[in-house]
Image: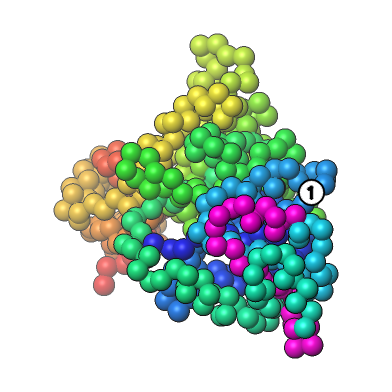
Amino acid sequence: MLPLNIAIVGRPNVGKSTIFNRLAGERISIVQDLPGVTRDRVYAKGQWLGRQLRLIDTGGIEFNNQPFVEQIRMQAEIAVEEADVIIMMASVTEGVTETDEMIAHLLQRAKKLVLLAVNKVDHPDLQAEIYDFYRLGLGDPYPISGAHGLGLGDLLEEIYRRFPLEDEGKEEEEVISFALIGRPNVGKSSLVNAMLGENRVIVSNVPGTTRDAIDTYFTYEDTQFRIIDTAGIRKKGKVSEATEKYSVMRSMGAIDRSDVTLLVLNAEEGIRDQDKTIAGYAHEAGKGLIIVVNKWDKLTKDNHTMTEFEQKIRAEFQFLSYAPIVYVSAMTKQRVTQLPAFIQKVYENFHRRISSSLLNQVLTEAIRINPAPSDKGRKLRVYYMTQVSTAPPTFVVMVNDEELMHFSYERFLSNQIRDAFEFTGVPIKIITRNRR
């Protein structure tokens, strides 16, 4: 079904993210009593009574000169353009403010369905306070309570009354999901914008600008992609604010939700210990992985620069020997157009399945080249191999005694599989089992 696009807008700290999370059914936006926590648009899917929703949470709109305010306002305006329905949020405890009036005036020009939701009506005694909101000129205000989930049914019923069921169409096609991971300020958001050709997320030189994990969809050569742009993962010692802690947790969640992860490195700064820690998260999660070296245009290069940089990467990331390396520049868009093809290829490898007959041909040849080892007079006997799952490709090797399987021989078998089949960008898991 084609979901309804619902944008939630309003000034800071009126409870937009709380309502967004309730409608989405999970904690996606950061919720905290701190104005301006949500800076970018955040997307999520939800449903109500079997109907599909596509929700867009936005940064709080303000009309002053605080940091990021102009960019936040622009993000909210783009969200309004994308939406079928706009929910303007206000707060009954603060009444109608000058900022509310300016936002309402902005929305009246949008020529979209705009519904006014007055939040924090947590007690029946506050119902009478909502009548003052009629002067915003947006029709009947809907009293709701994000904290208790009250009034949302009436709001959604009005939306579906305006948009009947026949507006929903075919089911969504298969989507390749990939996450950009890396330290703050390596250029992840700039890469998103370069790939999309538009300013979809806020880009700033201030480390940690992107706090929310953001889902963005695009199509490349008839293939649908979903970008999960994560907040930059900081060292634990630097994660002081509760908001930043949520961001790190959500970055891990973004890796879990992805098929392929792009580890973004900063060519100017080189490789840091934290880069290896971040890569370890994705590797341990068993995701497809591409190493993307950003800001490549900033280096003074000669004929040996790329070779030397690759040698450093391979030395520092020995556990990522399977990952391809792409050298890009978000600023000049150098090689950025190649990334979707790389992602699609790794995705195909991630879901590749090999027949048992072909696997056992490779196994027989591997044993001929390098016979199974012995330990304390007992010889390892390898009987057969089969693939039990994909994403990541996982193989079970049946032996006479799994305790005789040394990790070096397991690695040898893994390399033989890679030599025989296309698994670039994908970790391979081998499980040893005793034959029963």
Confirm whether residue 274 shows in the render. Answer: no
Name which residue type carries label 1: Phe
Confirm whether residue 116 shows in the render. Answer: yes
Residue 375 on the magenta span: no
Question: Does 181 sit left or right of 391 as displayed?
Answer: right
Residue located 53% across and 75% down the image:
158
Seen from the viewer's position, the closer of residues 249 and 235 is: 249
Q: Percent position (x, y) of residue 225?
A: 42, 47
Seen from the viewer's position, the closer of residues 301 and 295 is: 295
Residue furthest bottom in the image? 124
162 versus 7 height, above or below: below
106 versus 138 height, above or below: above
Residue range (magenta):
102-127
Which image quadrant for residue 14? bottom right
Residue with the mark numbered 1: 63
Residue located 59% across and 53% down the image:
110
Residue 125 on the magenta span: yes
106 versus 55 height, above or below: above
Question: Does 115 sit left or right of 303 as displayed?
Answer: right
Q: Quadrant of the C terminus?
A: bottom left
